[in-house]
Image: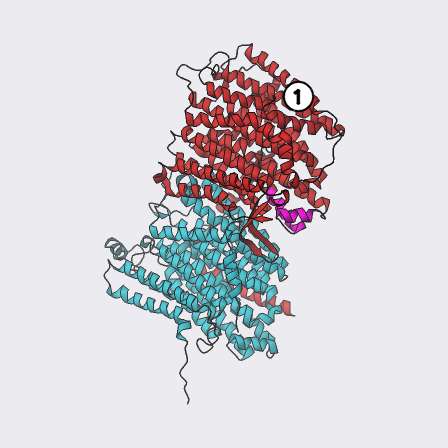
Chain colours: A cyan, B red
Amino acid sequence: MDFAAPVLNYSLLSPILILLAGALIGVLVEAFVSKALRPITQLSITLGSLVLSLVQVWRIRNEGSTTAAMGSVIVDGPAVLLQASILIISIISVFLIADTEQFTALAAALPGSDEERHALQSGNQVTEVYPLTLFAVSGMLLFPISSDLITLFVALEMLSLPLYLMAGLSRRRRLASQESALKYFLLGAFSSAFFLFGAAFLYGYSSSITFAGIHDAVNGAAGNDVFLLIGIAFLSIGLLFKVGAVPFHAWSPDVYQGAPTPVTAFMAAATKVAAFGAMLRIFYTAFANAQWSWTPVLSLIAIITMLFGSLVAITQRDVKRMLAYSSIAHAGFLLSGVIALNKAGLDASIFYLFAYGVATVGGFAIVTLVRDSAGEVTDLNRWKGLGKRSPWVATSFAVFLLAFAGIPLTSGFIGKFSIFSAAYESGAKGVVIAGVLSSAIAAFFYIRVIVLMFFTDPVEDGTSVEIPSSLTQITVAVSLIVTVALGVFPAPLLNFITDHAIFIR
Amino acid sequence: MTTSTSLVYLIALPLFGATVLLLAGRRADKWGHILGTAMSASAFAVGVYQLTQMLGRTNESRPVTQKLFEWISVGSFNVDAGLMLDQLSICFVLLITGVGTLIHIYSISYMSHDHDRRRFFAYLNLFIAAMLLLVLGNSYLNLYVGWEGVGLASYLLIGFWNQKPAYATASKKAFVMNRIGDMGLSFAIMIAFATLGTVSFDGVKAASEHASTAALTAIGIMLLVAATGKSAQFPLQAWLGDAMAGPTPVSALIHAATMVTAGVYLITRSNFIFDAAPTAQLLVVIVGAITLLFGALIGTAKDDIKKALAASTMSQIGYMILGAGLGPVGYAFAIMHLLTHGFFKAGMFLGAGSVMHGMNDEVNMRKYGALRKYMPITFATFGLGYLAILGVPPFAGFYSKDKIIETAFNAGGNKGIILGIVTLLGAGITAFYMTRVMILTFTGKSRWDDEVHPHESPLLMWLPMAILAVGSVTSGFLLSNGDALVNWLAPLFAEHGEHAERLQPMVVSLLALAVVAVGIAIAFFKYSRQEVLAIAPENVSVFTKIARQDLMQDKFNEAVFMRPGQLLTSALVKTDEAVIDGAVRGVGQMALGSGSVLRGIQTGFVRSYAALILVGAALLIAAIWMVTQ
């Protein structure tokens, strides 16, 4: 039997390989480096590999190729843009993760046990969250460049498994944190099963696992359409679950609330980029010519998602849950970019993903700062009058909220405007109407929070604002600058995306 | 069109000042005020440079543009962030930076005891930058950015002393009422884009020539709503009196000379829309006429010197709006009155600040009296402003206000007669309440408490007042000599034929002077001949009572806007609470946090979530099946 060694183009894969190497070193550091040096070593390794990986992405930006790994991955313009977005978002999230206050000292100990207390008192803080982050990021980088169903599934699990663990690492309210982690895991496994099932049907339809093969099969109308339809439906469930679209969203409010806030920030921002990146590639390449079958259904899901997210967010009293529902609504807005199925839709989606991701990290960074003696204060009623006590923190949060609401001069406005106009051009008028309507509803609860912070008298209940550590300051400052800069000078980035975002098959 | 690369410095300099002062924090306490003043002064220098350049060119090539960057370019919607300086905006640029710099200088001394003086200067610089952006933007969208910027700066400055709850409330009120006006502006922009396909001034002007009257009327009315909000015109006028809670230099700069005149700018800038939409133009005149009387009447009953001046501002801007509503003949006169008003009203506000400075921040004029002897410079500068606002020749108001009265009379038909009488009447009431302010403050017997020791203000305060007083005396003559301003602005507005002159200018001036004399006489007999009480008398006529209540404007707002709004809010809160309280609690940790209309879905149980996914999958298959059959 002939066995040809696989040909790998290492330079194109290097962004992922660097992260995996960093993660493995991180595991060793966890075992061998003394506890005093561990946090700083881990932080340096993590940041170092992320930055190195970003540099590498920049260097390969023009070397598009379909055969980076025997046709399993495609490196092209959108891939580079999405990978860069994921890396930038991860870098600013890592600054938040560096706040060890947020993480349990010993994740393996039972909540409330002596063992846990001992670990906390002796300062024996484990820092496995860093390698886990790197593993997750490497999965995220692989997800949007996968070009066959198997690689796609491997990437999905690579990014999901570390996230399940990270959700359970919270120091405060550990039971809730662990509950959310378990929920996320169970439901994630359930949706992965759908995903695999769908992949099997697609193979049955096209006798191929590559996107190009499925594309050709759709063009040739070779197979049984029922297989194709079930395949698309089930595969979509796996992806829609990850982005938190209704009705596959139920995990997200619970997990967003239960997970440590830095992890929530990372998860909400980076996972969305990766999952939508993969979704864009599949629907724009493999299923593009089967548009007749999936556009109406996906439109329906988009509309329900936007309206549901916006409406339910209104009733939330907890800032993290509110942001979770807001993120559901944004998943709906982003779906309209997938539905658009034109070049403008692709450009707009990539811009939106980056802008939204950065603002999300910034928003959660602010959440980590508002605390009392028992940890973060997420009850919105206790955010009253924050603008009087800490004008900078409140103003920054207000800017992020305005960006979520899509108010002009923030990145959110440009993102929403371009994604809706792309969808409108492609004829998805219903989606656009629902989108504008739910944006208006959503603006209500964002602005309500701003009113609460600036126009309500403070209550004296021990809520205080932590002096931000310099790392958190960097996160907030970077997010703030990007959010405003992309609102005022969006043209350079929009043009860059327009020039580069072309899928190759 | 001439292009320039230096326009951006007009905005960049004060913006730089604001940024540095805000970011540097306490470290900048020592030099913050100097930097702020220097930035404003250098913007003025750039403005003067631009004026000299402009004077050297012919009429057609005077406007200067500068493209900054491509702002939004999505599909068919393209907006560049660009600046345009033409004959109209240069007037504003010089007014904003010139008066602005004087007020910066004044504030150095006025705010010297405030430990947050640096922050004050940062906000002043921010205001200057935003206001310059407002008048320099080359499209409605760019103007809108500046429009919101000045709103923000105004809010921050009114509430500058927000440790006092009443002041914080005042800034909130101004903020909320301005939002209504801003909605008008955003609707105007949206309608313009939807019907004309562009939002730049040039584009809208070109497109308006063959647009439907209905669309232009809609845009015009929405622009008018915007103008009423920002310029404190009926029916959105109520906030201006409360805005006086801000430090006095702020009242002089923002709430007298510049920001509140933005509405006049907006209408004048949009002249091509209003000229083509007679209905909207008529509404402009009506709003102006109502406000000029409304403000004047409120002014007669105010004992608070700043509120009396605020009412006067409202009334004077009414004159400008009315002038701008009279079409091509009126635009230039509206702008002329705006400029002269900028001098004399800012001067009087600074004078009021100087009085307060010497009187332990007392604002009640009934506690003043006889200050002429103690504050001679303040008396002189305030007095010159007083003569200017009355329209006594040869002071500034004589040239600008009489022109508006004359144009109103000449508007033709019953409209002309009504407007002419209203403007004359306004002039008479103005004479009454301004004389009252003069008498109560500077003449008669002293009525202040023993611990007050009035004194003249220091040089840094009286110098700006003196310079503004020179402007109050000369600006009218300079601007109207040889129709200087009218000819300067003429290329921007539509041609207008010679109107039949119903009244000779001389007759109008004599009529106006007669009415003013009557106003002065009444005030003189009422306040100088009779004893003025230190405490406002209670047994006054019902009209005085209503006027003291600002003609019931707050009651009106409460009944029409606030009560229904409160009802709606409390209803929402009740539903909210009912839903939350009704939520099933105690199933799993997570359900505690969730409370929503759709709570049945968010139970916290993982099994029901999984079931939801299953149902969703089934529905998805069913939906695809149905679609493809």
Q: Residue A300 or A84: which is nearer the viewer?
A: A84
Residue, far bottom: A1
Kindly identify the residue that appears in the image at 54 percent across and 57 percent down.
Answer: A333
Q: Residue A264 or B591: which is nearer the viewer?
A: A264
* Residue B564, quarter of picture: top right
Kindly identify the residue that appears in the image at 50 percent across and 77 percent down.
Answer: A209
Magenta stretch encompasses residue B207:
yes
Relative image position of residue B351 (x, y in whole percent): 49, 24
* Residue A187, quarter of picture: bottom left
Instruction: Please give the count of numbered marks on the rendered protein.
Output: 1
Residue extent of the magenta highlight: B185-211
Q: How many C-alpha atoms fall within 10 Å of the one at disc 1: few (<14), some, or many (≥20)?
A: many
Q: Which residue is mark 1?
A: B512
Question: Is residue A455 positioned above or below A281 on the image?
Answer: above
Relative image position of residue B493 (x, y in whole percent): 67, 40
Q: Chain of mark 1?
A: B
Left or right of A239? Residue A420 is right
Relative image position of residue A94 (x, y in whole percent): 36, 58
Left or right of A399? Residue B629 is right
Residue type at the position of mark 1: Ala
Question: Is residue B458 positioned above or below A159 on the image?
Answer: above
Question: Magenta span: helix, strand or loop, mainly?
Answer: helix
Question: Is residue B200 positioned above or below A299 on the image?
Answer: above
Magenta stretch encompasses residue A323:
no
